[in-house]
Amino acid sequence: MIGPPITASLDAPQHGPRPLPLFLEMLRRETEGDAEARAAALAGLAAYQRAPRPAAPDLPPITHRVDRAGLRDYGGVGTPILFVPSLINPPHILDLGAETGLLRWLADQGRRVLLLDWGCPAPGEPRAIAGHVTELLLPLIAALEAPPVLAGYCLGGTMAAAAACLTAVKGLAVIAAPWRFHGFAPPARARIAALWAEAEPACARLGLVPMEVLQAGFWRLDPARTIAKYARFARLDPASAAAAAFVALEDWANGGAPLAYAAGAELFDFFAHDAPGRGAWMVGGRAIDPHALDCPRIDFVSTSDRIVPAASAAGFPDRHASRAGHVGMVVGSARRDALWHPLRDWLARIA
């Protein structure tokens, strides 16, 4: 081994990648023979753990609930715009701060904005991804005063597309959302399959897929980039706006509820067999095909997305592409051109 034992370099963390042993093992593997790169990443991780944390985002209260899921109401008037976040990571990426909160900005533009909060599953909950659509999302849509426009982010876009096939909606916007899972590069799919083979027995016993397992899956998509971003953080002024933004985003990325085991198993099966992309995903007893919808639809994709590559998108004719990145298109410096303004303008045309 080059340098000191990697686990001796940090005190027990208060914040940081979860679970830390998996991150450190990845770091050990990726920096083998490069002590300087290893030390830089560890310095950044330690700085991230020590960084001050602002108060948690103050989200609107839940106004309607179905089981563990609920709707958070941002106000506004007109056609409801229901944002459906991923099951992975907390929903507040869409409301991350005063300057980067897409939902508050759209409400200030006069739109009627709501956010779905999936809540936290209980161990053993037998609800797959399809069940989240039929048992939680569809009843919440039915509780609205009018058919909404659905705007789904990441896996939430996959689920919003399924819901749009099963109930009346005014439109469908999918944002950095996978549909054709064969569009992920074969090496990435192989790494994800290997992760599930390792983690599945413990997840089955827990009745949950912990966020730690899902985060490790993201790392395996681009481990070198994960390590490099911590090395870059070590060079930032801790009091800078850039450092504060990094901490807020990483805390979001490292947080979140677990998935119900059935939902996690279905997600990993998507990567293995691509049921949505093959037109074989059964939801509510129907094979789901969002390309057959007659409502307005639009894809927002990033050509630099390493988490959900543009090749995995549904491929709707109406498409807006940028290079802002998977999260950058929502909260990054290019967010207004990449997503905010074109989404606002599309909503104005259809709603």
Image: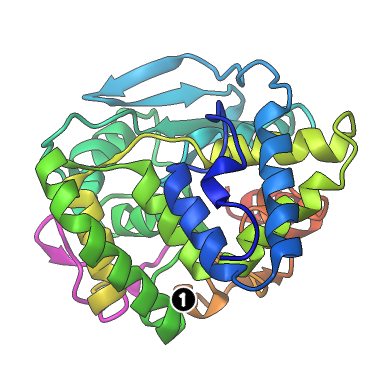
Q: Residue at x 84, y 40 (%)?
A: 242
Query: Left or right of 59: which side holds 85?
Result: left
The segment highlighted magenta reads: 277-295
Q: Is residue 84 magenta?
A: no
Q: Residue at x 30, y 29 (%)?
A: 120
Q: Residue at x 87, y 43 (%)?
A: 236
Q: Is residue 12 visible?
A: yes
Please give the residue where the numbered disc 1 appears in the rendered image. Answer: 312
Which quarter shows the N terminus?
bottom right
Q: Which of 171 and 121 lies nearest the eye of the viewer?
A: 121
Q: Is residue 300 visible?
A: no
Q: In the rendering, at what x and y percent does residue 256 appear?
A: 43, 35
Q: Which of 221 and 344 lies nearest the eye of the viewer?
A: 221
Query: Left or right of 314: which side holds 54?
Result: right
Give the answer, above or below, for where 284 lies relative to 210.
below
Res. 211 image quadrant? top left
